[in-house]
Image (cartoon, helix red, strand yellow):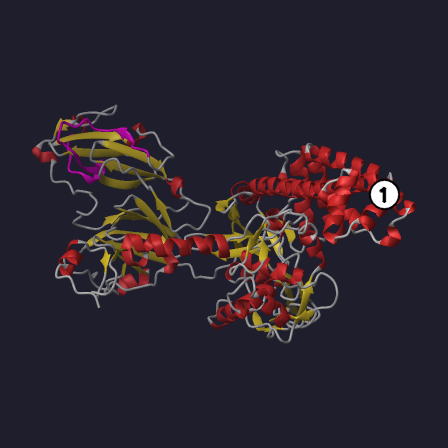
Amino acid sequence: MPKKNSNDKTKKADNPNVIGLRADVLEQPITDTLEVNYMPYAMSVIVSRAIPEIDGFKPSHRKLLYTMYKMGLMTGARTKSANIVGQTMRLNPHGDAAIYDTMVRLSKGYGALLTPFVDSKGNFGKVYSRDMACAASRYTEAKLAPICSLIFGDIDKDTVDFVDNYDSTMTEPSLLPTTFPNVLVSANTGIAVGMASNICGFNLEEVCQAAIEYISDPNCNLAQTLKAPDFPTGGELIYNAAELDSIYETGRGSVKVRARWKYMKEDNLIEITEIPYSTTAEAIIDKVADLVKTGKIRDISDMRDETDLSGLKLTIDLKRGVEPEKLMAKLFKQTPLMDNFSCNFNILVGGVPRVMGVREILSEWTAWRVDCVKRRVFSDLQKKKDKLHLLRGLQKILLDIDKAISIIRATEEEDEVVPNLMIGFGIDNKQAEYVAEIRLRNINRAYILKRTEETGALENEITDLEDTLGSSSRINSIIVSELKEAIKKFGAERMTQIVYEDEIETFEEEEHFEDYAVNIFLSKEGYFKKITPMSLRMSGEQKYKENDGAFLNFESQNKNELLIFTDQHQVYKARIRDFDDTKASNLGTYLPTALEMDEGENVIYILDPGDYLGHMLFFFENGKVARLELSVYATKLNRKKLTGAYSDKSPLCALMPLYEDIELAASSSDGRTIIFNTSLLAPKTTRSTIGVSMMSLRKNRVLERVLPLDQTAITEPQRYRVRAIPAAGAIIKPEDKGEKQMQLFEQEEPESIS
C-alpha cells in the first residue's frame, strides 16, 4: 500500500475540484473525469445508438436487418425470432431483450412504421396499446419484408463501407444502401446525451415523388408533392401551412393529429377506429374516465375498448339527446383524441448530428445516393474489365489450341503450367490461371469461340459504364428510375387523412351562469370583494386587515370581466363570475394570489371595461400623460395576462378611466398646478407609448397628483387653466389647497367610478 503523503489534506483544500477520499485512490480533477470518462460515453450514445443516419436507420436497426439478410431470410420461410436474436448478438452485444424490442418496432405486426421491414407472425403487440405486450421471442416468427429488396439489392457491390464488429470477428455495413429516402419514410425517435431526435414518417410514394422533383429542380415546391406527414395509426391531420413550411425548412415544428370516428345512429354510440400516433387507447380511456368522474363531461354513459383482430375500436355510449359532433369537439380539446407530434429532424451526417429541414435532408440523401450508385457502377465496371481481360487471354489461346495442350502435356510439374503458358502465349498470370482451369471437355473450338464472342459486348458495356461514371445526369437518371420502381412496387395510399382548418366545425361551449348586479370593492392591499346589493344593505361596516383600508368600489354585473392593473406594467383579465359572493364582514380574496401574479407584484387599479369603448389615462412622474383606447386591452383569445400594459419609461403617478372629455387638475411637487381639458390628448393604440408632455417640470421635480376639477377645492380655476400643453402652471394659492388626493394608494375614502 503506498505511503500516505502528509500534504494530501492541504492539496485537497487548495483544489476543491480534486477527487480522492483515500490515499490509495488516484486523484483526478473533475474536469479531467468529464473529458476522459463522460465525453466518450456521450459521443457513443449520440453517434452509435440514439440518432439515426442518412439511410434512416439506427445502428441497432442496421445490425438486426443485416443479420437477417445474412441468414437468408430475404426468401423462404420464417424462422423463430429467438434464432434471429441470437445471431444478431454477434453484431449487437446489448442483450437479447434490446434486440427483440428493436425487431418488434420494425415488424408489420406492431404497426409502428408505414413500411415495416420485418414480416412477422405471432403476437408482436400494437403501437397504439400501452398494455398489449408482445409474446416472447421463442413463440414468434419473422423474416425480411419484400421492401428489403430495395435495401440489400446493392449491398454486395461495394456501395457502402464495411467495418469490423465489436470483437473484430466479422464485418458489418456502416450504412444500408436504401434506394429510396427511408430517413423520411420511417418514423424514428431517440434520446441521446444533450440532444434528441423525433422524425415523423411520410408516405413512401409522396417522398419518392418529392425526391424525383428535387433532383430535377432543387428549388421545387415540396409542399405540392409532399403534402404532410403520414402516420401508420391513421387519424386526421389538421393542415397548417405555416407550421409545415417551418418543418420543411428548419426541421422543427409540430403537427396536430386527431382521431377518426363515426356515429352509429341506430345504437346511439360513437366508434373511434384511428387515434393519433403519439398516444394510446388506454391513455384516452383513462382521461375520458377522469372527465366523467369529475363531472366535466356528462354526455357519456359508458366507454370501452372493443379492439379485436380486425383492428382498433373504442366505443362510446351516448346519453339520449346528445349531439355527437359537439361531444367530439369537447373530447378533442380535453383528451389525447387530438394530440401534437413535435418534430425534431436531428440526423447524423458524416458522424455529425444536424437538425435539417426536408429540403436539406433530400439534398444530403441525394448526394449520398449518388455516391452509392457511382460505387456500384464502378464495381460493375471493374468486374467487366476483369472478365474482358481474361477473355482476351483466351483469344490468344484460340490461335493455337494444340500448342496450349502440348505445353500443358510437356510440363512435368503442376506449378509450372501457369508460368509456361505465360511464356508460350505472352499472357499474364490471371489469364494463364483462367486458361489452366478450363476443363478438358471445354477445350474445343466451339467453346472458345463462344467465350471470345463476348468480348465485343463487354467492350460496349464497359464504354457505357465509363460514360455513366462521368455523367451526373445519367447517375441521376438511375436514381430516378429506382425511385419510380419503388413507387410502382411499394407505393400505397395515405394512412392519415388531411383535414383543412376551414373544414372543421367549431362549437363554442355554452357556459351556464347566473347574471345579477354586484358591488365590487378593492382595498389598498389588494383584497377583492364581490357583494350583492341585498347583502350590502344587510351588512354592517366593511372589514379590512390592520393598516389596510378602502381603495375603490363600483357597481357591475356578474357576467362582466375586470381589467386589473399592477405595478409591474401588466394587466390581468378576470371574470367577475369566477369569484365567490362574499359579505362585508369577510376580508375578501387576495388578488395577487388568486391571479398567480409574479412575486412582489401588487394591484394598483381595477376596472370594468364594459364594451371597451372608453379610454384610459396614465400619468407619469416625468410630466407626461398617455391616453389609450380601452380596445387595446380587448383580445379575441381568452388571455389571462397582458404584458406591457403601459409604459415603463417613468414611474406611474396616477391612472383613471375616461368616457367623455373633462377638465383635470394636475399638481407638481414644487406647488404648481395646471388645469386642462382632456380633449387636448390624442388617443393612442400602442400600449407602450410614452405619451405626450402635459406639464413642464423643473429639475428634480415630479408630477404628484391628478384629479378631476370638480373633485378639487380650487375656487379660481381661470388662474390655472391652460389652452395648450405642456405648460408650467401657476403656484397654487393656500385657499385652493385641501383637495382630496387621487393617487394610487393614498385615498382616505373609497372613490366611486362609473
Q: How many marks?
A: 1
Q: Which residue appears at 31% of the width and 59% of the height?
A: 594
Q: Residue furthest top?
A: 724
Outermost right residue: 446
Residue 239 on image: x %, y % = 60, 48
User: In the rendered image, is residue 663 in sight?
Assistant: yes
Relative to 339, 543 lies left or right = left
Would residue 443 be found to the left or right of residue 709 on screen?
right
- On screen, 162 above or below 613? below
117 or 70: nearer the eye? 70
Q: Is residue 119 magenta?
A: no
Is 209 positioned to the left or the right of 535 in the image? right
Report crowding for label 1: few under 14, some 14 to 19, many 20 or more residues within 10 A (C-alpha): some
Which residues are drawn in magenta? 689-716
| Quarter of the rendering containing residue 528 | bottom left
Q: Is residue 506 above or below residue 375?
A: below
Amino acid on which disc 1 is placed? Lys
Q: Position of residue 453 (x, y in %)?
A: 87, 40
Q: Write the residue at 47% across / 62% down.
A: 512
Return the residue at label 1.
403
Q: Quadrant of residue 401?
A: top right
x 11%, y 32%: residue: 671
